[in-house]
Image (tube, rainbow, N blue to C red):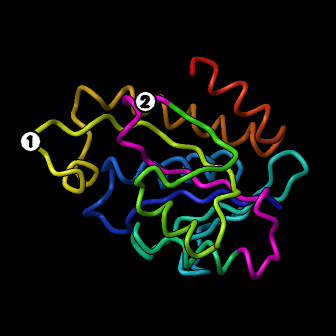
Amino acid sequence: MKVVVGLGNPGKKYEDTRHNVGFRVAAELARRHGAGTPRAKFQSEIVEGALDREKLLLMCPITYMNRSGASVLAARDFYKLELSDLLIVCDDFSLPLAKIRVRAKGSSGGQKGLEDVIRRLGSNEFSRLRIGVGSPPEQWDVADYVLSKFTTKEHDEVDTVIKQAADAAACWVREGIDKCMNQYNADD
């Protein structure tokens, strides 16, 4: 089984914010590959599905971003997952808008949800797919910026990158992290 975890914050207030691109990618994967309706488990909204012959679990933790690791740890322990079977999808304000970066392991890069996952799992040896949400303007606080909604001008680019990120996650499921990095980090 492969597990894709989209990070974000629950509730209408946070829909379509920069911080919730991970939720949007998980929703796109559920639309494409999910079976059944979302249900609650592991302090997450989950959808089970399949991609080719691989069983797929899509998760959106409802613990709020900074406590996402609790959900990921619960799923890992319940299914006895290897860290190589886990992909975390999150926003990254240090990447240009609509840029995707896939890595096999690494630091949190300041992303608080990813930081909590690393802390709870006791390891940074899992795949992550970061989606650029652009840098905050000079006068903005970072937290306020990532909790802000995309501008009308940014919507088309963001809608496109959500689909591309879902494609990248599907590539990770089908062909592994190396192929995914080679294909989606081509212009690094």
Q: CA distance from mark 2 to mark 1?
A: 22 Å
- Using a 10 Å C-alpha cutoff, classify the residue at mark 2 as few (fewer than 14 neighbours), some (14 to 19) or many (20 or more): many
Element type where label 1 sits in the image: loop
Q: Could you tell me which quadrant the N terminus lies in?
A: bottom right
Residue bounds of the magenta highlight: 76-99
Inspect the magenta stretch and tell me whether residue 89 lies in it. yes
Q: What residue did someone put label 2 on?
A: 98
188 w.r.t. 20: above or below:
above
Q: Nearer the viewer, mark 2 or mark 1?
A: 1
Q: Position of residue 170 (x, y in %)?
A: 72, 41
Q: Residue at x 56, y 35 (%)?
A: 101
Task: Identify which residue, 45 or 71, lies in the foreground.
Answer: 71
Q: Residue at x 80, y 76 (%)?
A: 79
Can you name the residue that lies furthest to the left here? 139
Can you name the residue that lies furthest to the top here? 187
Q: What residue did someone put label 1 on?
A: 139
Element type where label 2 sits in the image: loop
26 w.r.t. 135: above or below:
below
* Residue 58, quarter of picture: bottom right
In the figure, is residue 137 to the left or right of 12?
Answer: left
14 w.r.t. 175: above or below:
below
Q: Position of residue 178 (x, y in %)?
A: 78, 35
- Using a 10 Å C-alpha cutoff, classify the residue at mark 1 as few (fewer than 14 neighbours), some (14 to 19) or many (20 or more): few
* Residue 168, quarter of picture: top right
Badge 2 or badge 1: first in the primary sequence: 2
Q: Position of residue 111 (x, y in %)?
A: 42, 55
Q: Position of residue 119 (x, y in %)?
A: 55, 72
Inspect the magenta stretch and tell me whether residue 44 lies in it. no
- Type of amino acid under label 1: Gln
Q: Are marks 2 and 1 in contact (CB under 8 Å)?
A: no
Q: Residue at x 76, y 41 (%)?
A: 177
Can you name the residue that lies furthest to the right here? 53
